[in-house]
Image (tube, rainbow, N blue to C red):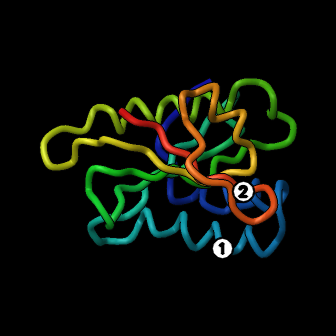
Amino acid sequence: MKIRPIRKEEVGKASRIVGLNYSKEFEKRSKCEIRAMFKNYEGKPKYLVAEHNGKIAGFAGYIQSWVDYHIYEIFWVNVTPEYQNRGVGTKLVRKIIKIIKSKRGEDKAHFILLTTTSPNFYKRLGFEILLKFKKNNYLMALEL
C-alpha cells in the first residue's frame, strides 16, 4: 500500500468514497473541500490517498489551523467499504501525524485536533477525547 498526495484528477474518486460511507450531500461537500488543495492560496488543505494495486482504497486530509499555527486538524479520513478494517485508515493517519510532527519553526505543531464518531480508532493512535457533543460525536486531540 502506497500513501501519497492526491492528484487533481482523483478528486472525484476520493469524494465518491465519502458518498459510499455517508451520503451524496457529504460527497458534494467533500469534493469542494478536496478541490481547495489545488487552489492558489496559502493555508490550503493537503490530502493523501492510500493506493493499493492502482486503486484508491482511502484518503484523508489535514490543515494548519488558522486559530493557532501550532495546531493542525485532520479530517475526511475515509476508506472504501472493501478496504475497511485492513489498516488503511491507520496508515493514512500515521502518515499525516508523521508529516505534521516534521514541521519546524513557526509551523511546528503542538496539537492535532479532529472530530469523529469513532473515538476508539483514534485512541489507539494516541488521541484523547476532549469533548463529546451531539449524540455520538467527539472532539479529540493528540499532544505532540
Secondary element at image label 2: strand
Q: Residue at x 15, y 49 (%)?
A: 106
Secondary element at image label 1: helix
Q: Which residue is mark 1?
A: 29
Question: Hey, what amino acid is under mark 1?
Answer: Arg
Is 12 rendered above or below residue 125?
A: below
Q: Quadrant of residue 88?
A: top right
Give me the disc on residue 3: none
Residue lying farthest to the left in this orientation: 105
Q: Which residue is mark 2?
A: 137
- The percent coordinates of residue 68 (x first, y second) are 28, 60
Q: Residue at x 48, y 49 (%)?
A: 113
Q: Quadrant of the N terminus?
A: top right
- The percent coordinates of residue 122 (x first, y second) are 63, 35
> Reading the chain from its start, which is encountered first: label 1 or label 2?
1
- The percent coordinates of residue 50 (x first, y second) are 61, 36
Indicate left or right for 82 with 45 as reference.
Answer: right
- Which is closer to the viewer, label 1 or label 2? 2
* Cα distance in 3D space between marks 1 and 2: 19 Å
- The tally of labels here is 2
Q: Residue at x 72, y 56 (%)?
A: 137
Q: Nearer the viewer, residue 7 or 67?
A: 67
Q: Quadrant of the C terminus?
A: top left
Question: Hey, what amino acid is under mark 2?
Answer: Asn
